[in-house]
Image (spheres, grey):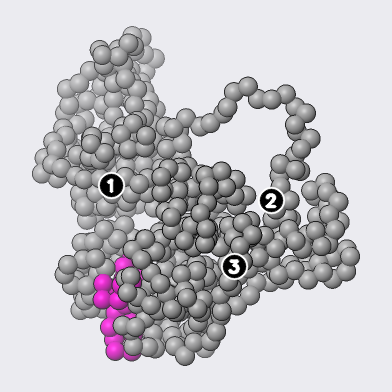
Amino acid sequence: MTYTPVITVRKSDLETLVGRSLSREELLYLLAKLKCEVEELEDDVLTYEANSDRPDLFSVEGLSRALKPWLGIQWRPFKIVDSNVNGYAKNIKERPYVALAIVRDLELSNEAISQIMQLQEKIAQTYGRNRKKVSIGLYDLDYIKPPIYYDLADPDETRIKPLNEPVTMSLREILDKTEKGVLYGFIIKDMEKYPVLRDSEGRILSLVPIINSDDFKVTPETRNVLIDATGTSLEEVVNAVTIMATSLAERSRSGVIEVVRVYYEDGLVVEAPRRSQLEIEVELESINRLLGTQLGIQDVVKLLSYFYYEVKPVNNEKLVAKPPIYRLDVKTWVDIVEDVAIAYGYEVLGEEALSLPPSTTPGRKHPVEYLSSRLRDILVGFGFQEVANYIMSNREIQLKLLGIDEELIVVENPKSDRFEALRIWLTPQLLEVVRENIEKTPRLAIFEIGDVVIPDPNMETSVRIERRLGLAITHEKTTLTDGIAYIKTILRELGVEAVFEKKEVKGFLPERTASIKACGGELGFVGEIDPRILYKIGVKNPVVIAEIILNKVISLCLK
């Protein structure tokens, strides 16, 4: 499943980078040209969906660069030069690759840093497969003593102060006591030693791929930044550094990006960012045949200039095009033709469709279905597996299993005792899935998005149908902290900041259960299942379950 990133930027910040004010109509039209769908454009907030294959558009910096040709504004190219800073990498089989780059002469604000962090997280979630494949870090270079080392460190003896945390911790403690450690610690927790970046004085820059040291964090006073990416794919590690460096360069007075060489123990030398893309040959006949046009060579050259291609006509029938280094999505001549079509205008190409009868009704996805789809993308990105349970259940599972006393909508003549009533919550069936699968894997993270039917005399139909998200997490050391970390991160992806208060839910530990509150209301709950219930059903490890009412998320927080 493809995760569709949703990006939020300040319109005023975008206008500063572009160099002029932008009307609502311009933004709606031009973002569509970039295959971005605007979700919100109110006051100073612009929220849009970007294609997952265009990470260069995951922040305001890349968006401003992409808009300039359409607005007739000259773009200042970045300068790529060799650096006198080097890196040295140990052979780490679980996460073998690291790439580095430097961007200098930055002018940063709190909003700029917010955008940089957003870009870092979105790349890690999408391109980086939730940090398993690629993760990115940024550091204030002026506090670092080069060269840079990619190394292994003892998880119990090595201590750092994690980013935005008040105290120092051992590397192992970070996995259990910080939000990022809970979310991503599974990537490295089974390693004997943990991967780190350090400088020549042995100071730890980051616990890879979990969290950076607070001692080297980027602030509005930062002028020179070191970028790193680590992961399991050499090409994609270099690509991630390229995206981050070229985006940051939009905030640089000089536009200087330094290529850092990393020397590996086995003799491999890696440079980042990449200096150029491959040249792709395209025949004019192929373009016109695919689009149904009669474009000439110079027409194509002009159209591709809207996307910063370097184009060299070979003759009147053929050209060679080289995309910018940050365009990771351009791999074949067909991708180039797509950009030609966008610049030419789909509205022009499809003009013949105007002869069709006009539509009489607008079509759009229902908000609860849209939110459900968004959440599926987010949760799959976090490594959760989706399960699908029947809306039909029975009194034994829905009520007696967790000891609750509620009413159900019961079927008069059920064909099976298993399906005798409509469910009123997701928790019991999620617990059943855990019970049935716990012997197959020591760690389980599942979710379900589905409807529940609750008797409600205040409703005209005497029932209330709610769409809910249910999560279940279990492993040897699962705690309420795991559930809270995931819920906070998931809701934050929707632009919602949650708070948690003590709550009692039947079947859950009273001191280890919390309500999820945001936007002036209660959205759901999260907690640890009572061990006596787990013992009864044969589950040895602790289990954390959360339920969120999506209808309330929409009505309270996403109006």
Q: Residue at x 37, y 81 (%)?
A: 141
Image location of residue 549, percent across then percent down:
31, 33
Residue at 21%, 66% in the rendered image: 165
Q: Of the residues shown, which amino acid type is indicated by label 3?
A: Trp
Report helix, strand or loop for mark 1.
Answer: loop
Comes first in the chain, label 3 or label 2: 3
Question: Circle 2 — which element?
Answer: helix
Element type at marker 3?
Answer: loop
Q: Please give the label number shown on residue 497.
A: 1
Above or below residue 535? Residue 398 is above
Residue 266 in the image, given as x and y percentages of width and height: 49, 87
Magenta residues span 198-218
Mark 1 vs mark 2: which is more N-terminal? 2
Q: Residue at x 30, y 14 (%)?
A: 459
Q: Are marks 3 and 1 in contact (CB under 8 Å)?
A: no
Type of amino acid under label 1: Glu
In space, the residues marked 3 and 2 are separated at their CA atoms by 20 Å
Label 3: which residue? 75
**Residue 417 at least partly seen:** no
Q: Position of residue 482 (x, y in %)?
A: 25, 52
Callout in the foreground (1, 2) = 2
In the rendered view, would you say 393 is above or below 64? Answer: above
Whether residue 254 is visible: yes
Q: Tell me where residue 306 appears, x and y as whole percent.
A: 67, 60
Q: Residues within 10 Å of mark 3 (few under 14, many from 20)?
A: some
Badge nearest the viewer, 3 or 2: 3
Which residue is disc 2 drawn over?
342
Q: Is residue 559 above or below residue 168?
A: above
Q: Is residue 240 magenta?
A: no
